[in-house]
Amino acid sequence: MAGRFAAGGAGGRGTRMSLTGLDLWTSFWRGSMKLLMVSVGQGRYAVSADAVARILDPELEPELRRAVQEGQAAVEGQPVRIVDLHRLAGETRTGTGVFLLVRLGSARTLLPVDQAEAIREVAPSAIAPLPPFIFAGEKRLFRGVFDDGERARLLLDEEALR
Amino acid sequence: MSGGSAPSLLGFRVGPVRAALPLALVREIIERPVVVRVPGALPHVGGVILRQGVAVPVYDLGRFAPLWQGRPDDTAGAPEERRHLIVCDWGDSLVAILAGGVDLLQAGDAGPADDAGPSESLRREFVGGMMRHGDSIVALLDPVRLFASLGVPAAPGGDAGEGDGEEDPARR
């Protein structure tokens, strides 16, 4: 099974994106994780596709771009925290990109990324846990690293995005 | 490497200092590794590498402030000078150190730190001894003190697991 990340749009009207074909039970039975591969600056990351509720396009919602500086945006009238991986990596944000609305329970977080690349299934056994002692605090943004066939990629911890 | 008895130390350059660790700790040396940066990690953590399915933390000693007398940035050295990774076994963990100028050394010439003069840059508590190698003075790092200060929990005889990471990052 493969989930599908689709992107398309008309000139001057931004880009419409959707996640389709997500089948949690199939993933469960196969013992695999469905991950959305994203890039942020020099970094390559992955986030559980099941946790991504929406992908927002700043071309359609320009206030999102301004909200990055404030660390918070309004989504559907509710305040949502923004986690800026560019800033955490010490990089300067360039380009437009998209915003992932990550949902964990009732908590929602916006994650600006340069590009949503693909959805792939990854065997949990392929993900190496990160040593917790490399982080300053108990809350860490990443829970593992895996080889995506081209390079190592960090797996975001949705719990830390709460 | 000098002639004579078998080497027992691995010498390397970190910033302006020649240092060494016991060769018995060294599992492998990797040239020009691809290190994955980890946003939010401690400043002296250069990132991680994947080795045989294990995430190995990479330490940049040039940025580890407690190791140095002065500001760590003054002693960090250019990235080009730190093109090797020294991967060490420490207890049940693997730990990697960014370094340059890697060389095998014999411990025969090692003497007390005071004999060769104190290092100008390294804090004395991290130095177990000094030895002369050619024209340079090599600081023998105390691995127990060094790794403990870096936050690596697995000391020999300790009970930390490999990588001491989360048991199941996939949360199965």
Image (cartoon, coloured by chain):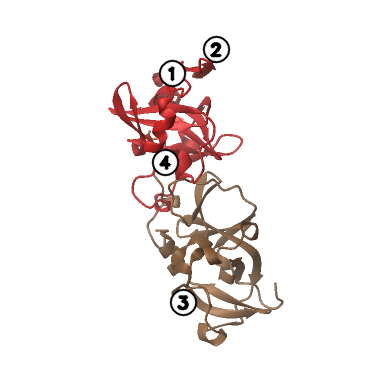
SS at badge 1: loop
In the rendered image, is residue A29 in sight?
no
Residues indicated by labels 2 and 1 sit on the same polypeptide chain:
yes
Distance between the alpha carbons at the discs numbered 4 and 1: 22 Å
Distance between the alpha carbons at the discs numbered 2 and 4: 38 Å
Q: Colour of chain A?
A: red
SS at badge 3: helix
The tag on residue B124 is 3
The chain letter under disc 2 is A
Pinpoint residue A145: horizontal percent, then vertical percent. Answer: 49, 41
Q: Quadrant of residue A24?
A: top left
> What residue type is disc 4 on?
Arg
The tag on residue A32 is none
Residue identifier under label 4:
A143
Distance between the alpha carbons at the discs numbered 1 and 3: 58 Å
The tag on residue A22 is 1
